[in-house]
Image (cartoon, grey):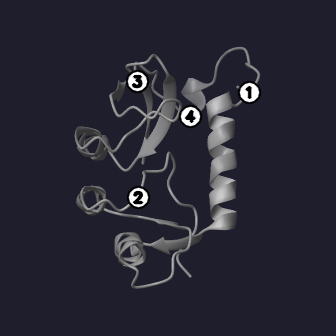
Amino acid sequence: MIRFSLKCTNGHAFESWFQSGPAFDALNDRGLVTCPHCGTSDVEKALMAPAISGAAAEPATAEPPRKASDVERRIKELRAYLEANSDYVGEEFASEARAMYLGDVPERPIHGIAAAEEAKALLEDGVPVMPLPFAPTRKAN
């Protein structure tokens, strides 16, 4: 997993986690990376400092811990709400979302994992789905 600092063309800055650099590029090329502030998919990586760990990285003077930004706090709240109020379906997300859309199974709030191609196909077919600004933390039941 890798965390990128991102910015949209409307000037909003935010961070998000991705499986890899190429995974970010693939999702962004398909318009699946969106700004949590305004919803635009015109997003690019912002300049960020690398995270370095170990004794060599310890500063000579300790700095107070960084307070979570408003966006980080809101994402944490969103995750807590989502996990408490929806079913995690894991890698079955695309098939479950499509089945609900087609009326084959009862509708219910779900979240899970979908490959970029699966997510794109759902969107092209009109299935109302959206990417989340975090990776799931639990496994399917």
Q: Which mark is residue 8?
A: 3
Q: Could you say which quadrant of the image residue 64 lies in?
A: top right
Rendered-image quadrant of the C terminus: bottom right
Which residue is depicted at the point 40% across and 24% down?
A: 8
- Judge the density around disc 3: few (<14), some (14-19), many (≥20) Cα neighbours within 10 Å: many
Question: Where 23 sits versus 63, above or below?
Answer: below
Circle 3: element type: strand
The residue where tag 1 is placed is 65
Circle 4: element type: loop
Q: Nearer the viewer, residue 96 or 92?
A: 96
Q: Earlier in the sequence, mark 3 or mark 2?
A: 3
Which residue is depicted at the point 69% across and 37% down?
A: 73
In whole angstroms, how far apart are the C-alphas of marks 3 and 2?
23 Å
Q: Earlier in the sequence, mark 1 or mark 4?
A: 4
The residue where tag 4 is placed is 54
Q: Nearer the viewer, residue 78 or 58?
A: 78
- Judge the density around disc 1: few (<14), some (14-19), many (≥20) Cα neighbours within 10 Å: few
**Dot in front, 4 or 3:** 3
Residue 27: tell me if it is visible. yes
**Dot in front, 2 or 1:** 2
Q: Which mark is residue 86?
A: none
Question: Where 5 sits versus 78, above or below?
Answer: above
In whole angstroms, how far apart are the C-alphas of marks 2 and 4?
44 Å
Which residue is depicted at the point 43% across and 76% down?
A: 100
**Dot in front, 1 or 4:** 1
- Residue 6: x percent and y percent? 42, 27
Give the amino acid at mark 1. Answer: Pro
The residue where tag 2 is placed is 128
Q: Earlier in the sequence, mark 3 or mark 1?
A: 3
Give the amino acid at mark 3. Answer: Cys
Horizontally, residue 132 falls left or right of residue 82, namely left
Q: Nearer the viewer, residue 103 or 46?
A: 103
